[in-house]
Image (cartoon, coloured by chain):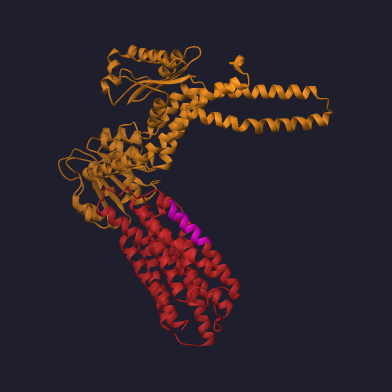
Chain colours: A red, B orange
């Protein structure tokens, strides 16, 4: 059943990614197709997660593939908050190809299989993994917003005559949304890390590469928030800082199988 | 059957010197429509800066055309060679194209739909023109919602406002500094105002002109020399003076940007020679557009409108076809009505003759009505379809003959 749901979800995200590319070239029908692709894909993925959860008697994040699957679901869910608005459609060009690729990776890395991982208690998983994944999903959406910011900024700087053909949110709005998303994601990451540290102290164990990368991510986004709301850094430099943080998020997501699930 | 007739003059064949003599305001349009409609006809006068058109519905199309021509020629004799005349489907298609902005100088311009609505509201309409204009308004709205024909700006001032939205998103609460109180700056400022921005300052070399514009648009008047000082407190600067040199140099803007703490600044230079040092655009967070940049944007958006116009043409053609089918169906409506009336008469007569209790009569009423409706449904649909395919009159005659309805014509 889960396998049956996986492919439609991947197909819908893939269709949306291609349609967003078409929307960038010629706005109109492609944008609607993309939006519907995202909605349908997300609903199918929701069903897939529910089936996996029922099958493994708990959330399906005890495997790297399951965790990645959940991460993609959170990213697309966060994107859907704004993505349905016509002006934010181009954000999909940054988010949906990534979602499709990550979902495909999840399939390659174990697909819909689940197994019991006795090393993790359910409460720990809910708090630690849940908060960290929510934060990472927020950082991913913020990175998409920052990419869109840089693209739009470049078009404005180059004074492209086609600037009004593809409407995207204003620079100031993109900058503000990225900052707000990070302002919500950092506390979630802080909570996730705090739970992780508490468990580490309780059960003992060493610090691994993933923990270091996650802590670095927290530092980068913490610095971003301090600079954004303290010093007032905005615009291109802020967008680059968000993307630097996202590189760490990507490393953390890819480093996961080498440490936690090895 | 009532025919639709259009007689008009437009920017395609008549220069503005001729068109202005045939222009009518709404009161005059209403009066002329009533005169042309007379006792039993229908008429609507559509007068905009690009056209004056008379739409008439009458059984005698030639007579209606003569009346329309005479009315326009009375306004201006020289209009006669520039007049065009269209009937029925062609007239409907023309009106739908007008309502969609496809017949305008700037494709997709937004004002025309409101003008069509106003003309319809003051016109002397009956069933034909009522349907025609309602469908025209629908076609106009549909063309705008299903294509991007009306989305892109078609003038320098609206392009400047659209650019400001690309930088700031919504313009509500964004502060504008207008430098130069001439017509160009005035237009750009008004466009920004309509999108929610607020005019903070108006700077001009002569104080009284700045004061006058400030009273009109809001904001405060100030001296031209103080522009650099206020730059940090505004989001958009629109400059259009006739000064021979730079009003703002790179150093002025650099200083203001530091105070803005990374918030973007949009500068629109509509002056020739230019008012703003072009190297300002190189500064981080600062976007400077001059008249050539905006003209390139407008040219591109107009090309985009023309591309969208092709899609809008297909929409209005579909609506015109629907109107043609509806108009043709009017040929068979009397025959359908007679057929139904005859059937109903027979049904009632037969029920009267039957000796039934109250409850039996109620049941029989229900059953016979249902039988009648089901029996006549398909012939009704077929006759309407035949009417749309121009066989309607033959079918209508056949029905009248077969059911003995000739006397009811």
Quadrant occupied by the C terminus of chain B:
top right
Q: Residue at x 56, y 83 (%)?
A: A118
Q: Residue at x 56, y 24 (%)?
A: B333
Which picture quadrant has residue B381?
A: top right
In x, y percent, where is residue A12? 46, 60
Q: Residue at x 37, y 49 (%)?
A: A27
In x, y percent, where is residue B214? 33, 36
What span is in magenta?
Answer: A32-43
Q: Please count the marks in the image.
A: 0
Residue B37 visible in image? yes
Which picture quadrant has residue A171?
A: bottom left
Q: Is residue B171 above or below residue A94?
A: above
Which picture quadrant has residue B114?
A: top left
In x, y percent, where is residue A130? 52, 72
**Magenta stretch, overall SS:** helix
Q: Residue at x 52, y 70 (%)?
A: A3
Residue B265 lies within the magenta run = no
Toward the viewer: B114 or B15?
B15
Residue A229 visible in image? no
Q: Is residue A17 above or below residue A221?
A: above
* Left or right side of B249 for B222: right
* Left or right side of B7 for A262: right
* Left or right side of B240 for B71: right
Q: Is residue B255 above or below residue A210?
A: above
- Residue at far left of view: B244
In x, y percent, where is residue A257? 44, 80
């Amino acid at each position: 059943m889960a396998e049956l749901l996986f492919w439609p979800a991947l197909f819908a995200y893939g269709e949306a990614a291609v349609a967003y590319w078409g929307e960038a070239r010629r706005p109109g029908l492609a944008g609607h197709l993309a939006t519907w692709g995202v909605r349908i894909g997300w609903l199918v993925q929701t069903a897939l997660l529910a089936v996996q959860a029922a099958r493994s008697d708990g959330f399906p994040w005890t495997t790297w593939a399951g965790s990645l699957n959940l991460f993609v679901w959170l990213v697309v869910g966060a994107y859907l908050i704004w993505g349905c608005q016509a002006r934010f459609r181009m954000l999909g060009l940054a988010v949906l190809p990534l979602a499709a690729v990550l979902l495909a990776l999840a399939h390659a890395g174990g697909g819909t299989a689940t197994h019991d991982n006795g090393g993790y208690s359910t409460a720990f998983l809910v708090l630690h993994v849940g908060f960290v994944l929510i934060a990472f999903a927020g950082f991913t959406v913020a990175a998409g917003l920052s990419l869109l910011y840089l693209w739009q900024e470049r078009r404005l700087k180059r004074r492209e005559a086609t600037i009004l053909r593809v409407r995207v949110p204003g620079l100031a709005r993109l900058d503000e949304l990225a900052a707000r998303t990070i302002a919500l994601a950092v506390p979630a990451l802080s909570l996730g890390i705090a739970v992780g540290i508490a468990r580490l102290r309780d059960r003992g164990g060493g610090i691994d590469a993933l923990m270091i990368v996650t802590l670095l991510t927290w530092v980068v986004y913490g610095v971003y928030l301090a600079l954004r709301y303290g010093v007032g850094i905005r615009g291109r430099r802020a967008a680059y800082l968000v993307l630097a943080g996202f590189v760490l998020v990507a490393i953390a997501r890819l480093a996961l199988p080498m440490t936690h699930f090895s | 059957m009532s025919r639709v007739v259009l007689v008009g003059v437009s920017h395609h064949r008549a220069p503005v010197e001729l068109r202005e003599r045939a222009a009518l305001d709404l009161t005059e349009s209403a009066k002329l429509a009533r005169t042309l409609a007379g006792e039993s006809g229908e008429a609507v006068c559509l007068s905009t800066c690009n056209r004056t058109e008379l739409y008439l519905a009458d059984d005698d199309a030639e007579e209606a055309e003569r009346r329309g021509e005479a009315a326009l020629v009375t306004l201006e004799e020289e209009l006669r060679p520039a007049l065009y005349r269209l009937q029925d489907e062609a007239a409907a298609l023309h009106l739908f194209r007008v309502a969609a902005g496809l017949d305008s100088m700037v494709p997709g311009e937004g004002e025309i739909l409101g003008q069509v609505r106003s003309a319809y509201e003051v016109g002397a309409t009956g069933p034909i023109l009522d349907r025609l204009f309602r469908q025209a308004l629908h076609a106009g709205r549909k063309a705008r919602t299903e294509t991007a024909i009306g989305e892109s700006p078609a003038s320098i001032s609206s392009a400047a406002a659209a650019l400001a939205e690309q930088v700031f998103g919504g313009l509500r609460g964004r502060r504008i500094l207008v430098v130069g109180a001439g017509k160009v700056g005035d237009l750009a400022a008004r466009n920004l105002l309509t999108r929610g921005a607020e005019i903070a300052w108006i700077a001009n070399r002569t104080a009284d002109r700045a004061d006058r514009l400030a009273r009109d648009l809001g904001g405060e008047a100030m001296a031209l020399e103080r522009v650099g000082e206020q730059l940090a407190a505004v989001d958009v600067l629109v400059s259009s003076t006739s000064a021979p040199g730079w009003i703002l140099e790179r150093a002025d803007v650099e200083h203001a940007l530091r105070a803005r703490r990374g918030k973007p600044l949009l500068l629109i230079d509509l002056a020739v020679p230019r008012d703003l040092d072009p190297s300002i655009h190189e500064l981080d967070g600062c976007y400077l557009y001059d008249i050539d940049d905006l003209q390139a944007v407008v040219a591109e958006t107009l090309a985009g409108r023309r591309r969208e116009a092709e899609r809008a043409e297909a929409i209005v053609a579909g609506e015109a076809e629907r109107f043609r089918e509806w108009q043709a169906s009017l040929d068979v409506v009397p025959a359908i009505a007679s057929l139904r009336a005859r059937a109903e008469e027979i049904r009632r007569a037969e029920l009267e003759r039957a000796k039934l209790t109250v409850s039996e009569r109620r049941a029989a009423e229900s059953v016979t009505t249902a039988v009648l409706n089901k029996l006549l449904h398909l012939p009704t649909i077929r006759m309407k379809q035949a009417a749309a395919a121009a066989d309607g009159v033959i079918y209508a005659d056949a029905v009248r003959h077969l059911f003995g309805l000739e006397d009811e014509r």
